[in-house]
Amino acid sequence: MTISTGVLPLAAEPSGPLRGRLKPPGDKSISHRAFILGLLCVGRTEIEGLLEGEDVLHTGQACRALGAKIERLGDGRWRVEGVGIGALLPPSDPLDFGNAGTGTRLMMGVVGGHGIKARFDGDASLRKRPMRRVLDPLVQMGAEVLEAAEGGRCPILLKGTPEPLPIEYVTKVASAQIKSAVLLAGLNSPGRTILVEPQASRDHTEKMLAYFGAKIASESFGQGRRIVLDGRPELRPARIVVPADPSSAAFPMVAALIVPGSEIVIEGMMMNALRTGLVQTLREMGGGIEILDRREEGGETVADLCVRASELCGVDVPEERAPSMIDEYPILAVAAAFAKGQTRMRGLSELRVKESDRLAAIAAGLRAAGVQAAVEGDDLIVEGRSEVAGGGCATTHLDHRIAMSFLCLGLAARRKMAIDDARMIATSYPTFLAQMGQLGARFS
Ligand code: S3P
């Protein structure tokens, strides 16, 4: 997948009521893992509903480079023929992950636990992101970092170990990426890998590993979890149905809440409790979100959500909720801009190391739209008003979620809102403009 080199400025116009139904694309976290687990078992894994965004396609390319045969059968339908744990091939070229931090970090776990060398690299945003948080435990397991740019950043040349030491690792930040890298490396360990997280992060790796036949147990304590994985399992290929991504659904959801007169239905959204902090918060703000037809699909609970334009009020979002809505703060901040009173979002230090420094990017974008916003320590404070001026331009810093958030703001502002570059939207939500357009959103 190539990304054009020029930038793509875009604006969202004040739009009439948003109406209709949509099914957001497949979950990005599960889609990355579907390719990776397909690589790690012998035989055919069939995937339905895969997110065909650039991030996931980069992970697919990396899996190919490590020996998997991957074929697209139709829209969202893919087949992976894996090589199995312990049998990965050394890649002949550097692995290019584009904008994808998740693909990079998870694959560092895979390579770190195998006796192969691989070079990891990506775009300018990825090259700024911290990788030591993943490399440190991998080094404890026996991997070696042969080359890295300043501060342990990409490009990185990693030499994995054919016999990862079984370790007990306590993560310092609630991060599913760190947890997953350690567990994926632990798959090729002759012993037991134990991962302790002080605050539970998304659990897709654990659930999918169990579904593929690994022996993995997870127990809760306080806000955290202790996960025990037995190494060298015989993974069985499986059929994966990817549910709609709550982190993508967040954009039409908030747009429908803030554009007067809107009413939409979001179909088949994943309701995993470790991913639904935004729905909880928007409902606390007075958002009219009705949860319909909860059901089980492909091992996850999904539901249809009926969302109606609502008068929102400011709230205090506790730090403990951050892992369950970590990617949703940019769009929550947009909802907060239209709410009555102040919203304080606490404990957001991790936002500084996402695809961009999101704390800074959100505050700057809101100010460009005429909204008062401040960063105090690790908290983001937004002073909401029922009328948002718009009329400015948000700088996106190669960050898809900043781009989509400020386009949503423009749909409900008094004047159109521009973004400097819409290209990165294709990393996670390639059908965003088309789906929003079908609901009645106007872009220019
Ligand atoms: C992800 C975990 C989160 C999230 C990212 C996807 C994953 O990162 O921000 O978009 O699929 O594991 P952290 O675990 O580093 O918070």
Image (cartoon, grey):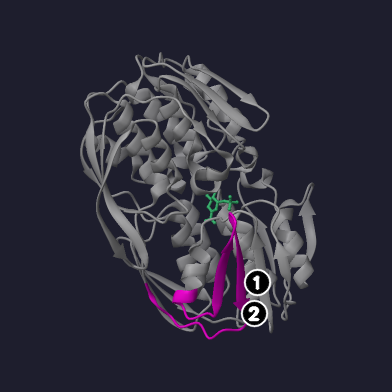
Secondary structure category for the residue under label 1: helix
Boundaries of the magenta span: 210-239
Q: Can residue 347 be seen by looking at this rendering?
A: yes
Secondary structure category for the residue under label 2: loop
**Mark 2 CB lies closer than 8 A to ligand 1:** no
Q: Residues within 10 Å of mark 2 (few under 14, many from 20)?
A: many
Task: Check residue 219 for magenta coloring.
Answer: yes
Q: Residue 347 falls in which quadrant of the image?
A: top right
Task: Check residue 252 for magenta coloring.
Answer: no
Q: Which residue is mark 2?
A: 188
Q: Nearer the viewer, residue 80 or 320?
A: 320
The residue depicted at 42 percent of the width and 52 percent of the height is 53
Q: Residues within 10 Å of mark 1 (few under 14, many from 20)?
A: many
Q: Can residue 95 be seen by looking at this rendering?
A: no
Q: Which mark is residue 252?
A: none
Residue type highlighted by circle 1: Ala
Tell whether label 1 touches label 2 (CB within 8 Å): yes
x and y percent of residue 93 in the render? 64, 65
